[in-house]
Amino acid sequence: MSNVKGHATIKVTIQRYRPEMDEKPWPQEFEVPYHFDLSVLETLNYIKDNLDSSLSFRWSCRMAICGSCGFMIDGVPKLGCKTFLRDYIDKGHFTIAALANFPIERDLVADISGFVQKLETVKPYLIRKVEQPISEGEYLQTPAQVARYKQFSQCINCGLCYAACPQFGRNSEFLGPAVLALAYRYNQDSRDQGSDERMPFLNSEQGVWSCTFVGFCSEVCPKHVDPAAAINQGKLDSTLDYGLNLISMAGGKK
Amino acid sequence: MSRKPYQQPQSATWWLQNSFFRFYMLREATSVPVFLYALWLMTGLLRLLQGAEPFNEWIALSTSPVGALLHLVVFAAAVLHAYTWFMLTPKILVIRLGSFRVPDAWVKTGHYVVWVLVSAWLLWMTI
Amino acid sequence: MNTFKRSHEPIAWSLFGAGGMVVAFIIPVLAIITGFIFTQSGDNDSYTLVMGWLQNWIGKTALFLIISTTLYHTVHRIYHALHDLHIKGNEWFMLVLFYGTATVLSVVCAAWLFIL
């Protein structure tokens, strides 16, 4: 920590990338005011307002629910709004970069559209074979039935788990933690009847079988979704599905 | 407006960048000494097939200072594997009794109890 | 758009999982036994002991399962670790090299136990 005009400050190195003039990202250092309750997101806004208005980054809600402000903060995927300068003040310095493994659109803006596309692929919504008429009321669930999927439904699509996943970094075709957790979430829902439409995705190489249970996705998830658990429980489902498929093939079906 | 997104390449040394990844790679690396140990067990089986004398030579090599040291490496690798395995298994093995979900901690503890019992039983069989 | 083909990984993963249990529960104590407890002489010498274990089908089957699943578990991990380390090889060659090795060694192991 150093002092400028009697105010505490902290140094931050920000990864810049301006597609119209840069071939690759480069680091830019700033010295910014320090206070124990300042978040990384507030610091980025301070820089944009006072030091360099050309800095680009995404944000919206400031309260860890919109999932927009994910960055690599000192190399770890975190939400800018949920990370505070006080965690880095002892070092006196920290870094902010765009989320790893995604293409960088500009500065700290990662292009997560590939993830959103994959999410649509696995049909993350309730599928009914037969819709119950409204006159019969809502689909009731017991607390135990809700508990089966509740944790996996907390995802805010921030993409931190993708930035944490070396298998996604290795092969961007991998459907990845959040998408597979969401698919598993609907398969676990007692109101849903669409698991046979989702299993082909889970069963594939790009599905649960690209995962090697590194587990860092669950570590960085700001909503404690535990995608690694969902994926690996999905491996059990997929293995069962594989066996059943063999039996039905032996029985002459398709 | 034309776009020019920067593709972030994954370096082959990605696993060195933080302690979580380093530990993951260490976990995966336990397979190498354990694989070699499986080959050594097969060697022992072959020597057993050849008779008492060859099998005793195999035991002499196994329990020699160098052999014992290598066995310690295998032991350490297998224990590290067991530690990580028992940590991850409860996440996959979800046991439900009616509407009651057996807590992860119980599943994990159960594994450790079985581990101690199996180890003690095998030692008792040998000594 | 991508095509999603059914992966055959469930076979490898099941063997990996079974081997993972064996490596966790059995291999630590077995390494202590073969490295430190086996002896060459005395009334209870280890040759007699081990022969005793392996004279029946329960013992033979147990040792076969221990060695075979351990082989499948470890080759599976090494195969995937090489992928993680960006060490590339022809996909079929690598599959045959690793899982093939485990299969051949398992068959050899079964044959030896059979004639023992």
Image (spheres, rainbow, N blue to C red):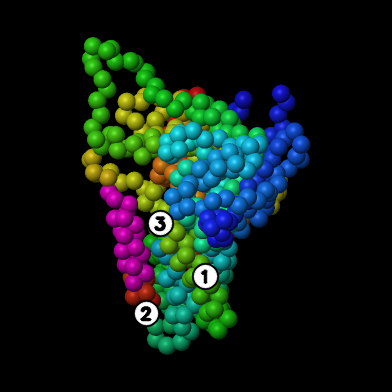
Q: Earlier in the sequence, mark 2 or mark 1?
A: 1
Q: Is residue A113 above or below residue A224?
A: above
Residue B74: assigned label:
1
Identity of the amino acid at label 1? Val
Query: Residue tagged by mark 3?
Result: B87
Q: Is residue B87 above or below residue B68?
A: above
Kind of element beneath mark 1: helix
Q: Earlier in the sequence, mark 1 or mark 3?
A: 1
Distance from disc 2 to disc 3, alpha carbons, whole Å, reads 31 Å
Distance from disc 1 to disc 3, alpha carbons, whole Å, reads 20 Å
Identity of the amino acid at label 2? Ile
Span colored in magenta: B102-120
Please state the horizontal and vertical placement of residue A95, each as a whole percent of the image.
59, 51
Residue placed most toward the observer, A84 or A244: A84
Identity of the amino acid at label 3? Met
Is C60 covered by the magenta stretch?
no
Q: Quadrant of residue C7?
A: top right
Is B113 covered by the magenta stretch?
yes
The N terminus of chain A sits in image quarter: bottom right
Query: Residue tagged by mark 2?
Result: B127
Label 2: how many Cα within 10 Å (few below 14, some 14–19, many 20+): few
Q: Chain of mark 2?
A: B
Kind of element beneath mark 2: loop
Q: In front: mark 2 or mark 1?
A: 1
Q: Residue furthest front?
A: A5
Please state the horizontal and vertical placement of residue B3, each as a whole percent of the image.
70, 29
Residue beneath the point at 40% across and 73% down: C52
Q: Are marks 2 and 3 on the same chain?
A: yes
Q: Are marks 1 and 3 on the same chain?
A: yes
Q: Earlier in the sequence, mark 2 or mark 3?
A: 3
Residue beneath the point at 40% across and 56% down: B87
